[in-house]
Image (spheres, coloured by chain):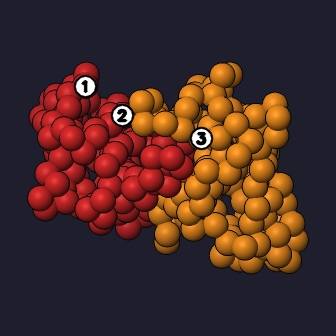
Amino acid sequence: DSGVTQTPKHLITATGQRVTLRCSPRSGDLSVYWYQQSLDQGLQFLIHYYNGEERAKGNILERFSAQQFPDLHSELNLSSLELGDSALYFCASSETSGVSYNEQFFGPGTRLTVL
Amino acid sequence: GESVGLHLPTLSVQEGDNSIINCAYSNSASDYFIWYKQESGKGPQFIIDIRSNMDKRQGQRVTVLLNKTVKHLSLQIAATQPGDSAVYFCAETVDNYGQNFVFGPGTRLSVLP
Protein backbone atom coordinates (compact mmCIF):
# COMPACT_ATOMS: atom_id res chain seq x y z
CA ASP A 1 0.00 0.00 0.00
CA SER A 2 1.58 3.26 -1.20
CA GLY A 3 -0.51 5.53 1.01
CA VAL A 4 -2.06 7.25 -2.01
CA THR A 5 -5.79 6.70 -2.36
CA GLN A 6 -7.93 7.09 -5.44
CA THR A 7 -11.66 6.98 -5.86
CA PRO A 8 -13.59 5.53 -7.47
CA LYS A 9 -11.82 2.31 -8.36
CA HIS A 10 -13.99 1.71 -11.39
CA LEU A 11 -16.13 4.10 -13.40
CA ILE A 12 -18.38 3.27 -16.33
CA THR A 13 -20.01 6.09 -18.22
CA ALA A 14 -21.26 7.09 -21.64
CA THR A 15 -19.76 9.24 -24.37
CA GLY A 16 -20.34 12.94 -23.87
CA GLN A 17 -20.53 12.68 -20.11
CA ARG A 18 -18.33 14.28 -17.46
CA VAL A 19 -16.60 12.53 -14.57
CA THR A 20 -14.42 13.51 -11.64
CA LEU A 21 -11.60 11.35 -10.32
CA ARG A 22 -10.29 11.99 -6.85
CA CYS A 23 -6.86 11.51 -5.34
CA SER A 24 -5.60 11.85 -1.78
CA PRO A 25 -1.80 12.02 -1.57
CA ARG A 26 0.35 10.45 1.11
CA SER A 27 0.39 12.37 4.34
CA GLY A 28 2.94 15.17 4.04
CA ASP A 29 3.33 15.01 0.27
CA LEU A 30 2.83 18.34 -1.44
CA SER A 31 3.09 17.20 -5.06
CA VAL A 32 0.38 15.39 -6.95
CA TYR A 33 0.73 14.00 -10.46
CA TRP A 34 -1.87 12.55 -12.80
CA TYR A 35 -1.15 9.92 -15.44
CA GLN A 36 -3.18 8.12 -18.06
CA GLN A 37 -2.39 4.55 -19.03
CA SER A 38 -3.96 2.98 -22.07
CA LEU A 39 -3.06 -0.13 -24.03
CA ASP A 40 -2.16 1.75 -27.18
CA GLN A 41 -0.49 4.83 -25.70
CA GLY A 42 1.24 3.43 -22.65
CA LEU A 43 1.78 5.56 -19.57
CA GLN A 44 1.42 9.28 -20.20
CA PHE A 45 1.98 12.17 -17.84
CA LEU A 46 -0.97 14.56 -17.68
CA ILE A 47 -0.33 17.23 -15.07
CA HIS A 48 1.63 18.05 -11.90
CA TYR A 49 0.52 20.19 -8.97
CA TYR A 50 2.64 21.35 -6.09
CA ASN A 51 0.96 22.78 -3.00
CA GLY A 52 -2.03 23.93 -4.99
CA GLU A 53 -0.07 25.39 -7.88
CA GLU A 54 0.13 23.88 -11.35
CA ARG A 55 3.76 23.08 -12.12
CA ALA A 56 3.81 21.16 -15.36
CA LYS A 57 1.48 19.99 -18.09
CA GLY A 58 1.99 17.01 -20.27
CA ASN A 59 -0.32 15.44 -22.82
CA ILE A 60 -3.51 16.67 -21.21
CA LEU A 61 -6.46 17.37 -23.48
CA GLU A 62 -8.36 20.63 -23.23
CA ARG A 63 -11.42 18.60 -22.22
CA PHE A 64 -9.52 17.56 -19.10
CA SER A 65 -8.75 19.76 -16.14
CA ALA A 66 -7.38 19.28 -12.68
CA GLN A 67 -6.94 21.11 -9.44
CA GLN A 68 -5.31 20.63 -6.07
CA PHE A 69 -7.21 21.85 -3.05
CA PRO A 70 -5.90 23.45 0.17
CA ASP A 71 -6.06 20.09 1.93
CA LEU A 72 -3.80 18.81 -0.90
CA HIS A 73 -6.22 16.33 -2.38
CA SER A 74 -6.61 16.60 -6.11
CA GLU A 75 -9.36 16.05 -8.63
CA LEU A 76 -9.11 15.29 -12.32
CA ASN A 77 -12.15 16.33 -14.33
CA LEU A 78 -12.80 14.69 -17.68
CA SER A 79 -15.55 16.13 -19.85
CA SER A 80 -17.18 15.42 -23.22
CA LEU A 81 -15.90 11.90 -22.84
CA GLU A 82 -14.97 9.88 -25.90
CA LEU A 83 -14.42 6.16 -26.33
CA GLY A 84 -10.69 6.79 -26.54
CA ASP A 85 -10.65 8.20 -23.02
CA SER A 86 -11.15 4.72 -21.64
CA ALA A 87 -7.99 4.01 -19.67
CA LEU A 88 -6.46 3.63 -16.24
CA TYR A 89 -5.89 6.95 -14.54
CA PHE A 90 -3.20 7.03 -11.89
CA CYS A 91 -2.43 9.61 -9.31
CA ALA A 92 0.99 9.79 -7.68
CA SER A 93 2.40 11.95 -4.93
CA SER A 94 5.85 12.97 -3.76
CA GLU A 95 7.30 15.07 -0.99
CA THR A 96 8.64 17.87 -3.15
CA SER A 97 8.84 19.04 -6.70
CA GLY A 98 12.53 19.78 -6.42
CA VAL A 99 15.46 17.76 -7.57
CA SER A 100 16.56 16.54 -4.18
CA TYR A 101 13.89 13.95 -3.63
CA ASN A 102 11.55 12.87 -6.37
CA GLU A 103 10.30 9.41 -5.59
CA GLN A 104 6.69 9.24 -6.64
CA PHE A 105 4.24 6.93 -4.94
CA PHE A 106 1.40 5.76 -7.13
CA GLY A 107 -2.16 5.06 -6.16
CA PRO A 108 -4.05 1.96 -7.28
CA GLY A 109 -5.67 3.81 -10.18
CA THR A 110 -9.18 4.47 -11.44
CA ARG A 111 -10.32 2.37 -14.36
CA LEU A 112 -12.52 4.47 -16.63
CA THR A 113 -14.67 2.80 -19.25
CA VAL A 114 -16.52 4.99 -21.73
CA LEU A 115 -19.32 3.20 -23.61
CA GLY B 1 -6.30 -7.16 -13.06
CA GLU B 2 -5.98 -5.68 -16.49
CA SER B 3 -2.99 -6.70 -18.57
CA VAL B 4 -1.05 -3.59 -19.44
CA GLY B 5 0.55 -3.42 -22.83
CA LEU B 6 -0.45 -6.80 -24.26
CA HIS B 7 2.07 -6.41 -27.07
CA LEU B 8 5.05 -5.29 -25.04
CA PRO B 9 8.50 -6.75 -25.69
CA THR B 10 9.06 -9.62 -23.31
CA LEU B 11 12.21 -10.76 -21.59
CA SER B 12 12.15 -14.27 -20.19
CA VAL B 13 14.82 -15.27 -17.71
CA GLN B 14 15.47 -18.27 -15.54
CA GLU B 15 14.99 -17.83 -11.81
CA GLY B 16 18.35 -17.00 -10.26
CA ASP B 17 19.82 -15.53 -13.42
CA ASN B 18 20.54 -11.85 -13.91
CA SER B 19 18.16 -9.72 -16.00
CA ILE B 20 19.01 -6.72 -18.11
CA ILE B 21 16.23 -4.46 -19.33
CA ASN B 22 17.08 -1.73 -21.79
CA CYS B 23 15.56 1.62 -22.57
CA ALA B 24 16.38 4.24 -25.18
CA TYR B 25 15.39 7.72 -24.13
CA SER B 26 14.54 10.52 -26.47
CA ASN B 27 15.77 13.84 -25.15
CA SER B 28 19.45 14.62 -24.68
CA ALA B 29 18.44 17.40 -22.26
CA SER B 30 16.85 14.95 -19.82
CA ASP B 31 18.65 15.03 -16.53
CA TYR B 32 16.75 12.67 -14.29
CA PHE B 33 15.69 9.10 -14.95
CA ILE B 34 13.60 6.56 -13.06
CA TRP B 35 12.84 2.89 -13.41
CA TYR B 36 9.39 1.72 -12.38
CA LYS B 37 7.96 -1.74 -11.87
CA GLN B 38 4.29 -2.39 -12.51
CA GLU B 39 2.66 -5.61 -11.44
CA SER B 40 -0.65 -6.70 -12.90
CA GLY B 41 -3.53 -4.69 -11.50
CA LYS B 42 -1.33 -2.27 -9.59
CA GLY B 43 0.15 1.17 -10.07
CA PRO B 44 3.81 1.68 -10.98
CA GLN B 45 6.29 1.31 -8.18
CA PHE B 46 9.56 3.24 -7.97
CA ILE B 47 12.64 1.00 -8.19
CA ILE B 48 15.65 3.23 -8.64
CA ASP B 49 16.60 6.60 -10.06
CA ILE B 50 19.71 8.22 -11.50
CA ARG B 51 20.72 11.74 -12.38
CA SER B 52 22.59 12.75 -15.50
CA ASN B 53 25.79 13.50 -13.59
CA MET B 54 26.13 9.80 -12.79
CA ASP B 55 26.81 6.74 -14.96
CA LYS B 56 25.83 4.06 -12.51
CA ARG B 57 23.78 3.67 -9.39
CA GLN B 58 23.19 0.60 -7.30
CA GLY B 59 20.33 -0.40 -5.10
CA GLN B 60 19.33 -3.62 -3.48
CA ARG B 61 19.73 -6.26 -6.22
CA VAL B 62 19.28 -3.58 -8.88
CA THR B 63 21.73 -1.45 -10.82
CA VAL B 64 20.93 1.31 -13.27
CA LEU B 65 23.42 2.29 -15.96
CA LEU B 66 23.19 5.52 -17.91
CA ASN B 67 24.97 6.12 -21.21
CA LYS B 68 24.31 9.70 -22.21
CA THR B 69 26.36 9.42 -25.40
CA VAL B 70 23.86 7.02 -26.96
CA LYS B 71 20.89 8.03 -24.80
CA HIS B 72 20.54 4.59 -23.28
CA LEU B 73 19.44 3.43 -19.88
CA SER B 74 19.53 -0.10 -18.52
CA LEU B 75 18.24 -1.85 -15.44
CA GLN B 76 20.08 -4.87 -14.15
CA ILE B 77 18.37 -7.18 -11.69
CA ALA B 78 20.61 -9.66 -9.92
CA ALA B 79 19.43 -13.15 -9.02
CA THR B 80 16.01 -12.64 -10.56
CA GLN B 81 13.13 -13.98 -8.48
CA PRO B 82 9.54 -14.90 -9.38
CA GLY B 83 8.37 -11.75 -7.61
CA ASP B 84 10.31 -9.70 -10.15
CA SER B 85 7.85 -10.69 -12.89
CA ALA B 86 6.22 -7.45 -13.96
CA VAL B 87 6.31 -4.71 -16.59
CA TYR B 88 9.27 -2.36 -16.23
CA PHE B 89 9.18 1.25 -17.45
CA CYS B 90 11.90 3.80 -17.73
CA ALA B 91 11.00 7.46 -17.40
CA GLU B 92 12.91 10.62 -18.21
CA THR B 93 12.29 14.20 -17.27
CA VAL B 94 13.44 17.41 -18.82
CA ASP B 95 11.97 19.81 -16.31
CA ASN B 96 12.90 19.83 -12.65
CA TYR B 97 10.66 22.69 -11.60
CA GLY B 98 7.67 20.76 -12.80
CA GLN B 99 8.03 17.04 -13.03
CA ASN B 100 7.06 16.36 -16.63
CA PHE B 101 7.98 12.72 -17.14
CA VAL B 102 8.11 10.86 -20.43
CA PHE B 103 7.75 7.10 -20.14
CA GLY B 104 9.15 4.38 -22.32
CA PRO B 105 6.81 1.72 -23.72
CA GLY B 106 7.78 -0.85 -21.10
CA THR B 107 9.26 -4.35 -21.09
CA ARG B 108 7.53 -7.37 -19.64
CA LEU B 109 9.85 -9.50 -17.52
CA SER B 110 8.84 -13.11 -17.15
CA VAL B 111 10.75 -15.24 -14.65
CA LEU B 112 10.78 -18.93 -15.44
CA PRO B 113 10.98 -21.49 -12.62
- In the image, what residue occupies the spot 45% across and 46% down? B96
Residue A26 lies in what quarter of the image?
top right
Residue B38 in view in this figure: yes
**Amino acid type indicated by mark 2:** Ile
Q: Are marks 3 and 2 in contact (CB under 8 Å)?
A: no
Judged from this view, the residue extending furthest toward the front is B97
Alpha carbons under labels 1 and 2: distance apart: 8 Å
- Could you classify mark 1 by the number of other residues whose Cα lies within 10 Å: few (under 14), some (14-19), or many (20 or more)? few
Label annotation for residue B59: 1
Provide the chain ID for the residue under circle 2: B
- Where does the image place residue A29, in percent across and percent down from the top left? 63, 28
Residue B15 in view in this figure: no
Please name the color used to draw chain B: red
Q: Compare marks 1 and 2 and give the one earlier in the sequence.
A: 2
Alpha carbons under labels 1 and 3: distance apart: 22 Å
- Where does the image place residue B47, in percent across and percent down from the top left? 36, 34
Give the residue number, with chain letter if any, for mark 3.
A92
Q: Are marks 1 and 2 in contact (CB under 8 Å)?
A: yes
Provide the chain ID for the residue under circle 3: A
Q: Give the SS element for disc 3.
A: strand
- In the image, what residue occupies the spot 25% across and 22% down? B60
**Amino acid type indicated by mark 3:** Ala
Q: Are marks 1 and 3 in contact (CB under 8 Å)?
A: no
Image: B59 above or below A8: above
Label annotation for residue B47: 2
Please tell me which residue lies in front, A53 or B100.
A53
- In the image, what residue occupies the spot 68% across and 51% down? A54
